[in-house]
Image: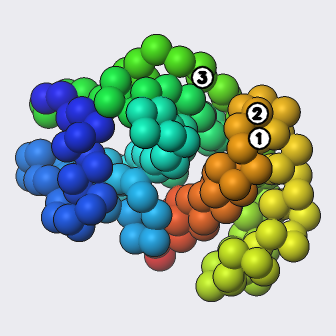
């Protein structure tokens, strides 16, 4: 089953989840323009967040709560992005379209996230921008994406907030 960007952005704008089967669904990520592919059986979450760059292009930020592979960013025409769900196995694969993929396996150090979450999970953007995590992200994002300052700021804040979502969800699994 294929879910293109226009369908996924509809989930973001409406907040209405798509039930794929009894085990999995696609839901809006609260507070972000993105979706969470949830598999109940394994308590897996695959997150895709969209940051608009211009009328056609955007950056898709992807991470999960089960592989420890870090973050992937796709600078691509958003209309080309989709993911495909294997409904029998509740697994997904994605296609980012033409564009540039950047892997950031350690852009947010896993051991730093719990203390950041504890201090800043309810912080304002201005408060987050004063953290070392934000400054470190800014160096990488500026170096590899070379977008406008405003877009890079959105990406940096989105990555931090996405790290908080993934951390929170991983803690719910442990509880």
**What residue is shown with label 2?**
146
Real-space Cα separation, disc 1 to disc 2, in angstroms:
7 Å
Residue 70: x %, y % from top left: 65, 40
Residue 107: x %, y % from top left: 77, 44
Residue 103 occupies quadrant: top right
| Vertical position of residue 168 compared to residue 109: above or below | below
Real-space Cα separation, disc 3 to disc 1, in angstroms:
12 Å
First-in-chain label (3 vs 2): 3
At 12% from the left and 46% from the top, the residue drawn is 20
Mark 1 and mark 2 in contact? Answer it, CB < 8 Å: no
Q: Residue furthest front?
A: 55
Colour mode? rainbow
**What residue is shown with label 3?**
101
Real-space Cα separation, disc 3 to disc 2, in angstroms:
13 Å
Q: In the picture provided, is 42 more to the left or to the right than 59?
A: left
10 Å neighbourhood of mark 2: few (<14), some, or many (≥20)? few
At 72% from the left and 44% from the top, the residue drawn is 148
Residue 164 occupies quadrant: bottom right
| Vertical position of residue 147 compared to residue 112: above or below | above
Q: In the picture provided, is 146 more to the left or to the right than 45?
A: right
Q: In the picture provided, is 87 more to the left or to the right than 41?
A: left
At 26% from the left and 46% from the top, the residue drawn is 8
Residue 35: x %, y % from top left: 35, 53
Q: Nearer the viewer, residue 137 or 113?
A: 137
Residue 141 is marked as: 1
First-in-chain label (1 vs 2): 1
Looking at the figure, which quarter contains the N terminus?
A: top left
């Amino acid at each position: 089953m294929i879910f293109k960007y226009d369908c996924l952005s509809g989930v973001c704008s409406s907040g209405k989840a798509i039930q794929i089967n009894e085990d999995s669904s696609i839901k809006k990520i609260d507070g972000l323009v993105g979706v969470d592919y949830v598999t109940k059986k394994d308590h897996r979450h695959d997150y895709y967040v969209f940051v608009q760059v211009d009328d056609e292009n955007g950056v898709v930020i992807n991470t999960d709560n089960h592989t420890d592979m870090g973050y992937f960013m796709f600078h691509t025409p958003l209309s080309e992005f989709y993911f495909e769900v294997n409904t029998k196995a509740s697994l997904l694969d994605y296609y980012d379209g033409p564009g540039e993929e950047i892997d950031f396996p350690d852009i947010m150090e896993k051991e730093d996230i719990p203390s950041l979450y504890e201090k800043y999970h309810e912080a304002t953007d201005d408060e987050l921008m004063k953290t070392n995590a934000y400054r470190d992200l800014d160096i990488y994002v500026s170096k590899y994406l070379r977008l406008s300052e405003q877009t890079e700021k959105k990406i940096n804040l989105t990555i931090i907030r996405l790290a908080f979502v993934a951390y929170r969800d991983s803690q719910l699994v442990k509880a």
